[in-house]
């Protein structure tokens, strides 16, 4: 799968593009909501600042605290290295709630739940686009499974092989063939792995190494780390002094990122439907509660199809993502139940309403 769009010498990553699209659409949608309710559009700048800062910090700290606290206690400076990966949406959700509390108190002077009821609409849409970006980045992959919904994520294998053979090859590319092989109850698609050899390397020696060492070794990785496996008795074919080809098996996995993207987009449509349907009675906290219930209810379900993010999840009846989702689902149900006890109509109750 393509991971970017070439623009001259620059490659725009699909993940970056998805983030940009979600940012632009979210900005315009929230701005339209403010205008609809006669709220000051000038709130957009502080809202953007609070939301972005809270999301990044919360997502990072969520991963640090929930998934790898021992590692980051030993390497505290790496907490700041967000570009190395490791973000948790549960942490982002908690931080966003805190940010909306501060924004409501310092800037908008509205009930916190009024802000949360609206920000979650654009958050649901942004989450859908970001999961599409995760798919193109081969991040947050699913477990291996014999399913009609399957994707072979070859990019992690490409990075692994490029790193392992960095002094011998300058690239490796995978091409799917029409052949499939059933092995140990799994149906594997067959790929051709093309290794592009450095000029100073003997291709014969590298071919033997591929056959005897590296590819069989990949079959010994944990199931969550396997993306390609050695084809039984495969022989490396020297295509030219700078290219070697060998058959491998692609490990089909559930594309859980796309499952989530679809669920989040449907959640966005449900939230925007209820928002637009509401004209005279705004029940504080209903949309926020609905968001928590929909998003994390689906997370509770789909996590069973995901590969473990960290080693300690192995053998757990519920993984960390599921455990963190349960209290948020319960909180969502609570907010929906109590929401009818208090209403808030900005255009009637707020002193800073815009008269048009």
Image (cartoon, rainbow, N blue to C red):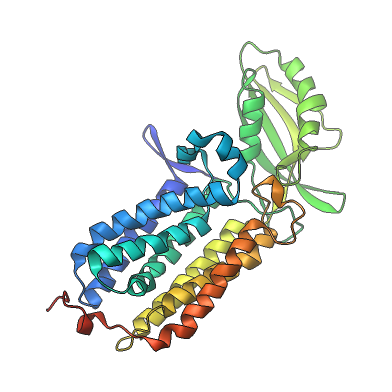
Q: Relative to the observer, which residue lies in front, 91 or 238?
A: 91
Q: Which residue corresponds to the image point at 21% horizontal and 85% vertical from the top-left?
A: 348
* Total residue callouts: 0
User: 220 above or below 99?
Assistant: above
Q: Relative to the observer, which residue lies in front, 165 or 327?
A: 327
Q: Is residue 72 visible?
A: yes
The x and y percentages for residue 262 are: 54, 66
Which residue of the protein is positioned furthest toward the top in this rendering?
A: 200
Q: Which residue corresponds to the image point at 35% horizontal and 57% vertical from the top-left?
A: 51
Q: Which residue corresponds to the image point at 41% horizontal and 80% vertical from the top-left?
A: 273
Residue 233 horizontal side relative to residue 133, left or right: right
The x and y percentages for residue 144 are: 73, 52
Q: Relative to the observer, which residue lies in front, 112 or 261?
A: 112
Residue 146 horizontal side relative to residue 336, left or right: right
Q: Is residue 18 visible?
A: no
The x and y percentages for residue 145 are: 75, 56
User: 103 above or below 314?
Assistant: below
User: 137 above or below 242?
Assistant: below
The x and y percentages for residue 278 are: 35, 85
Q: Quadrant of the C terminus?
A: bottom left
Residue 13 horizontal side relative to residue 44, left or right: right
Q: Quadrant of residue 205?
A: top right
Q: Quadrant of residue 276?
A: bottom left
User: 160 above or below 298?
Assistant: above
């Amino acid at each position: 799968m393509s991971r970017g769009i070439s623009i001259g010498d620059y490659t725009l990553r699909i993940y970056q593009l998805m983030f940009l699209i979600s940012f632009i659409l979210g900005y315009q949608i929230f701005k339209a909501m403010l205008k609809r309710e006669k709220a000051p559009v000038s709130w957009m700048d502080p809202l953007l600042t609070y939301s972005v800062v809270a999301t990044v910090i919360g997502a990072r700290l969520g991963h640090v605290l929930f998934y790898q606290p021992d590692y980051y206690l030993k390497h505290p400076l790496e907490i700041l290295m967000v570009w190395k990966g490791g973000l948790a949406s549960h942490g982002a959700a908690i931080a966003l709630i805190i940010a909306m509390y501060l924004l409501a108190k310092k800037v908008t002077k509205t009930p916190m739940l009024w802000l949360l009821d609206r920000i979650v609409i654009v958050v649901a849409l942004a989450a859908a686009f970001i999961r599409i970006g995760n798919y193109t980045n081969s991040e947050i992959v699913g477990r291996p499974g014999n399913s009609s919904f399957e994707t072979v994520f070859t990019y992690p294998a490409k990075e692994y092989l490029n790193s392992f053979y960095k002094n011998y090859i300058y690239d490796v590319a995978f091409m799917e063939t029409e052949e499939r092989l059933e092995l140990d109850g799994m149906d594997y698609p067959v790929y051709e792995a093309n290794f592009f050899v450095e000029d100073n390397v003997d291709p014969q020696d590298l071919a033997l190494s591929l056959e005897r060492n590296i590819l069989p070794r990949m079959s010994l990785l944990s199931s969550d780390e396997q993306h390609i496996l050695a084809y039984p008795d495969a022989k490396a074919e020297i295509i030219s002094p700078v290219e070697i080809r060998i058959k491998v098996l692609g490990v089909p996995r559930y594309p859980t990122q796309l499952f989530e993207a679809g669920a989040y987009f449907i959640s966005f449509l449900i939230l925007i439907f209820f928002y637009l349907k509401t004209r005279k009675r705004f029940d504080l906290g209903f949309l926020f509660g609905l968001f928590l219930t929909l998003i994390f209810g689906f997370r509770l379900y789909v996590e069973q199809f995901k590969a473990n993010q960290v080693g300690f999840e192995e053998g757990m009846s519920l993984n960390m993502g599921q455990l963190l989702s349960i209290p948020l689902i319960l909180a969502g149900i609570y907010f929906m139940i109590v929401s009818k006890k208090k209403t808030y109509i900005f255009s009637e109750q707020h002193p800073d309403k815009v008269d048009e």
